[in-house]
Image (cartoon, helix red, strand yellow):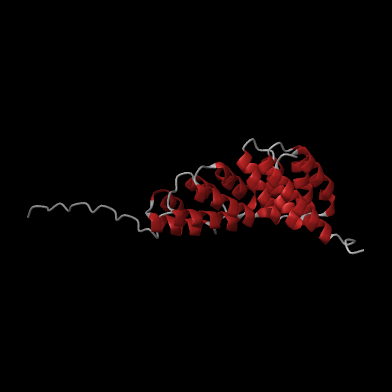
Amino acid sequence: MPLIRKTPVAPAAASPAERPATELLRAGNADERWSAARALGSVRDGTGALGDALRTEADTRVREAIFTSLVRLGGSRAVDAVLPFLGVDDANLRMGALDALRAMIDDARPVLPELLSDPDTDIRVITCDLARGLPSPEATRLLCDVLARETEPNVCSAAVDVLAEIGEADALPFLKACAARFGDATFLIFAVNIAVERIAERRPDSNG
């Protein structure tokens, strides 16, 4: 009786559940990438894969999952993964990066002084807003430094806006000096006057 050769059976493709999350995040469909992004938020070394994925991910829902997982992981590596996207043209991606940094402001603290000196005016403006999440004394020190050296009125205006909300009395001379330096910027002078009034109202001796 002749031997009948059996046709070799090809190994079954791995199901999505069996494929590594890093692979799914890189090459899966949108739902698989979303699930993988969420799963990597619980993996200690998932930060690198999440940061890499942000560079190419176009699906808004998946991006949101990536940012959420980076915030969950936290730490300096997560901050470093998010920072490059503060200066991109894509408004949604830029806002996602800003929201992520705001959510992990304690981890982002060490990089704020550098960001406040960034050559990109928009990044300096954004960083002034991030300072809103700091304790009042720390935010006041950072933003007073900005007012003392900044040459762009829009950046000063962003700093003044935050100081109006949480600034301490130490900011008053810096605000007045800023107003004097930009005497022709009406919108900035107006903002400074409001900030000075609000800070004065918050001073413990303001009613004494």
Q: Where is residue 49 in the image (x, y as percent from the top left)?
A: 50, 48
Q: In which quarter of the image is the C terminus?
A: bottom right
What residue is at 29 percent from the left and 53 percent from the top? Answer: 11
Depth check, front residue: 81 or 6: 81
Q: Position of residue 201 (x, y in %)?
A: 82, 60
What residue is at 88 percent from the left and 61 percent from the top? Answer: 206
What residue is at 42 percent from the left and 50 percent from the top? Answer: 23
Q: Say above or below: 41 vs 189.
A: below
What residue is at 51 percent from the left and 42 percent from the top? Answer: 89
Question: Viewed as shown, does residue 77 lie left or right of 59?
Answer: right
Question: Viewed as shown, does residue 115 lie left or right of 4?
Answer: right
Q: In which quarter of the image is residue 41?
A: bottom right
How many circles with numbers are drawn on the protein?
0
Is residue 135 in view?
no
Q: Where is residue 104 in the image (x, y as percent from the top left)?
A: 64, 55
Q: In which quarter of the image is the N terminus?
A: bottom left
